[in-house]
Image (spheres, rainbow, N blue to C red):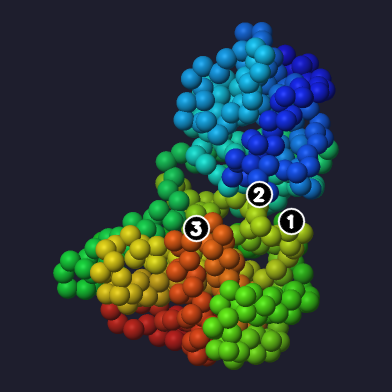
């Protein structure tokens, strides 16, 4: 690659006209259908390949008020490079074909050189599955490069937070390798690739399938006695989560003013969205809403993960790692960067444990659905309590929580309800077959006695009931 070949260029008219339909086919595009208005913010040639006519192009296009980053392969012919990647095709005219460069191994290798300023080289490159908001490329099973598609104003939260946590000595993020920025914005971020890791969602489902299989095939067993018990792992994950929050406090500071006006806005938002999404539950939810409005002390506020669930953590031979600090993509960037209660992340993981139980129920025969609900609840109670126990065992987390136990429970429940409402809206829009999962959760969260919700379940570590000291936050 000739590093000098980064001159500005004008996208050919035929290529520009094809970009809109291409965007509409991508999962990372936020609009619906081809953009009505679109313009090229900047376009450049990043590399000219040795075969002469082939080039790696880069462009930022503004579409419907958002900036999107494109990396485009320009070749005389695509050959078989688009096989299985038909959605990557952009245009073909004259003696040129244009498509998303991330599906082309040779182009992806050139991109690594550009993004690292020539510091990183690899022999092999491959795209990593289909993602909602970005594109990830794996190089030699050593480096993973996340190419940000919808560009934020200023630093990207994932790159910013990961780099800051690594700088504190927090050992549970993949080490940063490179950061490609332009005009104060992150274009791509490279990290150590966690080869051989398993995400928490897959581990939870394996545990649940073992447990449900035992529950339906012979005399029911307690989750602590099933072959795939997950509690020890999730307890360790709770401790890592506590360490993450302490590192967040060190890296980004602590707001002793707590949530302030955020809390009133959150409670009001819960009621408004509940009236829209589950109107039949609003009357039953009034005691909970009143209790949430009576919280006196929310504890300090720190930077949080913001979209914390089992799919955002990975278990390797070296322990748990936390991934993807961008936050919930549908929420405004300012909201995702705002300091909040650590219980937002705790609640997110607790919701994820519930999601896993019900997703695994859905994998079983329909005739087993009712039979399995008590077992789903037992597994969830055990693992919720194990996660919270690990979190509380992390020295220093006590200072990040609301001081009054009842207020702790109320804040946690508020974030659980907030997350369940977010999930329900998302599933209605994108995965209607999953709507039953957050709907079931909301029926419980909005209808159960408030004192019971705030206390949380006891820890079912063994067939004997645990004591009150093991109750949730």
Q: Which mark is residue 431?
A: 3
| Quadrant in which the N terminus appears | top right
Say which label, 3 or 1, has the lower sequence index: 1
Distance from Cα at disc 2 to Cα at disc 1: 20 Å
Residue 373, percent from left and from top:
33, 75
Helix, strand or loop under label 1: helix
Number of the front mark, 3 or 1: 3
Q: Which residue is mark 2?
A: 32
Residue 346 shows in this picture: no
Q: Which residue of the protein is positioned furthest toward the left in this rendering?
A: 218
Question: Pointer 3 and pointer 2: residues touching (CB < 8 Å)?
Answer: no
Residue highlighted by disc 1: 333
Image quadrant in which you'd find residue 364: bottom left
Measured from the top left, where is residue 341 in percent x and y?
67, 71
Q: Residue at x 72, y 40 (%)?
A: 68
Snapshot quadrant of residue 101:
top right
Q: CA distance from mark 3 to mark 1?
A: 24 Å
Q: Residue at x 49, y 73 (%)?
A: 439
Percent position (x, y) of residue 360?
A: 36, 62
> Counting residues from the N terminus, which is met first, the one under dot 2 or under dot 1?
2
- Classify the position of the C terminus by image quarter: bottom right
114 up-or-down from 295: above or below: above
- Which is in the foreground here, disc 3 or disc 2? 2
């Amino acid at each position: 690659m000739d590093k000098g070949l980064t001159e500005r260029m004008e996208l050919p008219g035929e290529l520009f006209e094809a970009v809109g339909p291409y965007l509409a086919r991508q999962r990372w595009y936020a609009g619906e259908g081809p953009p009505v208005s679109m313009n090229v913010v900047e376009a450049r040639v990043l590399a000219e390949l040795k075969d002469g006519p082939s080039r790696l192009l880069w462009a930022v296009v503004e579409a419907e008020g958002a900036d999107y980053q494109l990396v485009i392969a320009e070749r005389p012919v695509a050959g078989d490079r688009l096989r299985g990647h038909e959605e990557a095709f952009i245009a073909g005219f004259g003696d040129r074909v244009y498509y998303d460069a991330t599906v082309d191994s040779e182009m992806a290798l050139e991109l690594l050189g550009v993004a690292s300023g020539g510091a990183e080289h690899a022999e092999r490159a491959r795209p990593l599955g289909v993602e909602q908001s970005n594109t990830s490329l794996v190089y030699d099973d050593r480096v993973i490069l996340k190419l940000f598609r919808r560009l934020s104003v200023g630093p990207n939260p994932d790159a910013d937070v990961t780099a800051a946590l690594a700088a504190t000595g927090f050992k549970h993020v993949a080490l940063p390798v490179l950061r490609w920025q332009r005009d104060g914005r992150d274009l791509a971020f490279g990290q150590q690739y966690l080869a051989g890791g398993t995400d928490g969602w897959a581990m939870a489902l394996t545990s649940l399938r073992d447990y449900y299989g035992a529950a339906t095939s012979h005399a029911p067993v307690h989750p602590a006695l099933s072959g795939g018990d997950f509690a020890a792992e999730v307890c360790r994950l709770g401790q890592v989560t506590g360490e993450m929050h302490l590192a967040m406090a060190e890296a980004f500071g602590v707001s002793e003013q707590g949530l302030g006006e955020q809390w009133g806005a959150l409670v009001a938002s819960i009621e408004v969205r509940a009236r829209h999404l589950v109107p039949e539950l609003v009357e039953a939810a009034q005691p909970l809403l009143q209790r949430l409005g009576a919280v006196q002390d929310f504890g300090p506020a720190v930077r949080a993960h913001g979209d914390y669930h089992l799919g955002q953590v990975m278990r390797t031979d070296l322990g748990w790692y936390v991934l993807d600090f961008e936050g919930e993509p549908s929420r405004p960037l300012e909201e995702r960067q705002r300091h909040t209660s650590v219980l937002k992340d705790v609640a997110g993981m607790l919701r994820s444990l519930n999601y896993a139980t019900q997703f695994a129920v859905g994998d079983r025969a329909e005739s087993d659905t009712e039979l399995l609900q008590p077992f789903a609840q037992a597994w969830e109670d055990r693992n919720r309590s194990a996660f919270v126990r690990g979190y509380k065992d992390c020295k220093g987390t006590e200072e990040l929580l609301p001081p009054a136990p009842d207020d702790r429970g109320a804040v946690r429940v508020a974030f659980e309800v907030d997350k369940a409402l977010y999930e329900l809206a998302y599933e209605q829009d994108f995965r209607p077959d999953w709507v039953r999962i957050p709907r079931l959760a909301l029926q419980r969260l909005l209808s159960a006695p408030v004192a019971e919700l705030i206390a949380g379940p006891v820890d079912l570590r063994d067939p004997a009931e645990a004591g009150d000291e093991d109750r949730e936050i």
